[in-house]
Amino acid sequence: MAKIDFSWDELNPESEIDKDNGEAGEELPTRKNLQFARRLFHMANGVTIATLYWLSFTHQQAIHTLGTFACLLYVMEQIRINYPEMSQKLLPVMKFIMRAEEQLKESAMVPYAFAVLLTIITFPKPLALIAIYTLAISDPLSAIIGIKYGKRRVVPHKSLEGSAAFLISSFLISLFILSATIGGFSITVLVVSIVLSLGVSIFEMLPLKVDDNLTIPLFTAFFGWVVCLLFGVHI
């Protein structure tokens, strides 16, 4: 049986496989590592989905396409988890986008895909776009900035520098999407973008145990809906 080191807060954890079972061990990164390829992978996925939904796909096409992808991804993850001998063969490639703590459970791509799907199903298109772009751009950008340059802690595991990157990028995303989809720039759009990005940035700092790939887009879209209603912005 696999012996996996669950001390994921260490910078260089080791995930070793029991050699008595004839399986080779291999070290995998954790959320403390930069893992640039993984963050670019998540960013590219989210940006591609949001852009296709904005420019090409209808609402129904986006739901059908992403729903099919999410179901296939879930099935593939179950196969990977329940047939470790198969996953070991893929590890040399998967290690670039996989973490140590994901060896015995679904990877972050599962809540990522289902959160984006639920966001598209539930919320108006401009808010869904803001939420998906925020997940795709602001979340990995804040992690990269926080890991490389974070010096001042706001809360445990969150730096002022990383949170600032999240705030600024989410503000620019909100301002751009709202200006492009509801009739141009206005003071109201500016204020809504400021309030929305502040609220989402505060939420992102909360030490929740639920995967942020699930919570960030859903909260962003919901909070954006509330803010737009309060300021009389018709989406």
Image (cartoon, grey):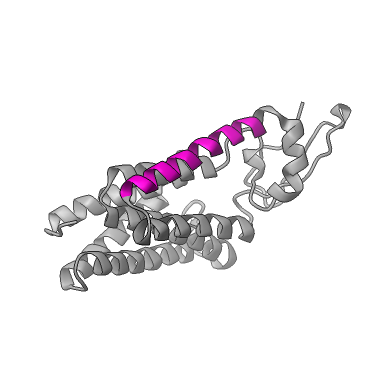
Quadrant location of residue 218? top left
Q: Which residues are magenta?
A: 59-80
Where in the figure is residue 147, as x and y percent of width and height? Answer: 57, 61
Q: Is residue 165 left or right of residue 73?
A: left
Residue found 46% across the figure and 61% down from its top:
137
Q: Is residue 198 left or right of residue 74?
A: left
Quadrant location of residue 126? bottom left
Quadrant that contains the C terminus: bottom left
Closer to us: 166 or 90: 90
Give the overall secondary structure of the magenta segment: helix
Residue found 29% across the figure and 42% down from its top:
122
Closer to us: 174 or 86: 86
Closer to us: 175 or 4: 175
Residue 78 in sight in this render: yes
Residue found 49% across the figure and 51% down from its top:
156
222 in relation to 133, above or below: above
Q: Is residue 76 magenta?
A: yes
Q: Is residue 157 magenta?
A: no
Where in the figure is residue 161, as x and y percent of width and height? Answer: 47, 66
Where in the figure is residue 149, as x and y percent of width and height? Answer: 56, 68
Closer to us: 153 or 128: 128
